[in-house]
């Protein structure tokens, strides 16, 4: 039974990696794809929580830009505060 658990775990990890890669590729094609950005925004781990993501989304809406365009400004601001 142990090998079935490991196989299931490997399949889940592989699926996660595929989704992340597809997310990055989708962002290359369309930087306004918020679903793709949501998938990859914290991969690798960047200490961005749900609140940070929401703040970025509100800032993008306020400025009339995509979240992708607003992201560098907010990440730099967050890292300089800490």
Image (cartoon, grey):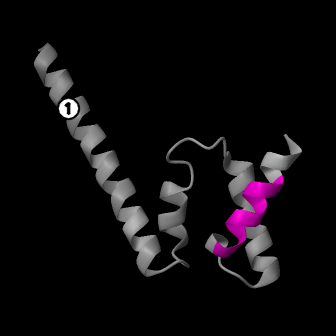
Seen at 79% across and 70% down, the residue is 59
> What percent of the width, then of the height, locates residue 17?
32, 48
Total numbered badges shown on the rendered structure:
1
Which residue position is annotated with label 1? 8
Per the picture, the main secondary structure of the magenta-coloured stretch is: helix
The quadrant where residue 14 appears: top left
Which segment did they paint magenta? 69-77
Residue 66 magenta: no
Residue 75 magenta: yes
Seen at 77% across and 65% down, the residue is 73
In the image: residue 81, left or right of residue 1: right
> What percent of the width, then of the height, locates residue 2?
15, 14
> What percent of the width, then of the height, locates residue 53?
68, 57
In the image: residue 18, left or right of residue 52: left
Q: Nearer the viewer, residue 17 or 61?
A: 17
Local packing at callout 1 (Cα closer than 10 Å; few below 14, some 14-19, many 20+) is few
Seen at 62% across and 71% down, the residue is 68
In the image: residue 11, left or right of residue 32: left
């Amino acid at each position: 039974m142990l090998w079935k658990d490991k196989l299931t775990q490997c399949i889940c990890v592989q699926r996660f990696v595929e989704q992340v890669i597809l997310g990055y590729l989708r962002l290359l094609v369309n930087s306004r794809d918020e679903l793709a950005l949501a998938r990859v925004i914290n991969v690798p781990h960047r200490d961005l929580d749900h609140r940070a993501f929401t703040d970025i989304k509100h800032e993008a809406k306020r400025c009339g830009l995509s979240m992708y365009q607003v992201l560098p400004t907010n990440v730099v601001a967050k890292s300089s505060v800490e």
